Amino acid sequence: MTIVLDATAALAAVLHHPAKGSILGALESASVVIAPDLFVTEVASGLRRYASARQLEPDAAARLLESALGLVDRYVPVASLAREALHESVSLGVAVPDLCYLILARREGATVLTIDRKLERLLAEMRVGSVLRAKKLTRA
């Protein structure tokens, strides 16, 4: 199974989140893990928030960034997704970055691994792949 990993799930996987073990288990069972390359800046931005709030030391945030980036086997250039994401963003009223994950999953016939409930709802509405829901992840 191909998994599209989003930044929320990656952050949960490297931080002390209740779904951490389940997320890592899902990633281990994947044949390949992919993400749009905007994933890198989204994860870095998430870790910056923790460091700015003094919940993480800057060096620890940098190590966690490397760990999160290592969860992905292949990055897809966002430039190859942007035109379609923009078009659908306008018609759906959804943020372009969220649509990049959705479009990548649709193109690859992949499952999206996320703990973002808004993205989960969008994926369900668009009938894109199967979504590994946060609710299921926290039970494992």
Image (spheres, rainbow, N blue to C red):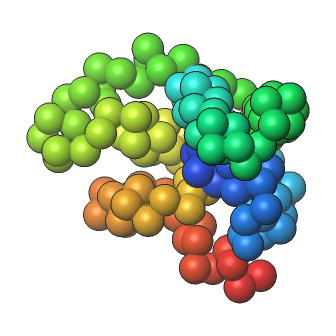
Q: Tell me what residue is drawn at x 20 percent, y 29 percent.
A: 87
**In this picture, is 28 found above or below 93?**
below
**In this picture, is 97 found above or below 6?**
above
Q: Could you tell me if residue 111 is visible in this image?
A: no
Q: Percent from the top left, x then y, of residue 29?
A: 83, 59
Furthest toward the left, the residue is 91
Furthest toward the front, the residue is 54
Report whether 91 appears left or right of 112. Answer: left
Q: Tell me what residue is drawn at x 86 percent, y 29 percent.
A: 59
Q: Classify residue 97 by image quadrant.
A: top left
From the viewer's side, name the closer residue of 107 and 11: 11
Q: Could you tell me if residue 104 is visible in this image?
A: yes
Q: Tell me what residue is drawn at x 58 percent, y 45 percent.
A: 6
Instruction: Name the quadrant of the N terminus.
Output: bottom right
Instruction: Name the quadrant of the C terminus.
Output: bottom right
From the viewer's side, name the closer residue of 94 and 56: 56
Q: Percent from the top left, x then y, of residue 67?
A: 85, 37
Q: Classify residue 18 by image quadrant.
A: bottom right
Q: Percent from the top left, x then y, of residue 34?
A: 66, 36
Q: Tell me what residue is drawn at x 29 percent, y 39 percent.
A: 95
Furthest toward the bottom, the residue is 139
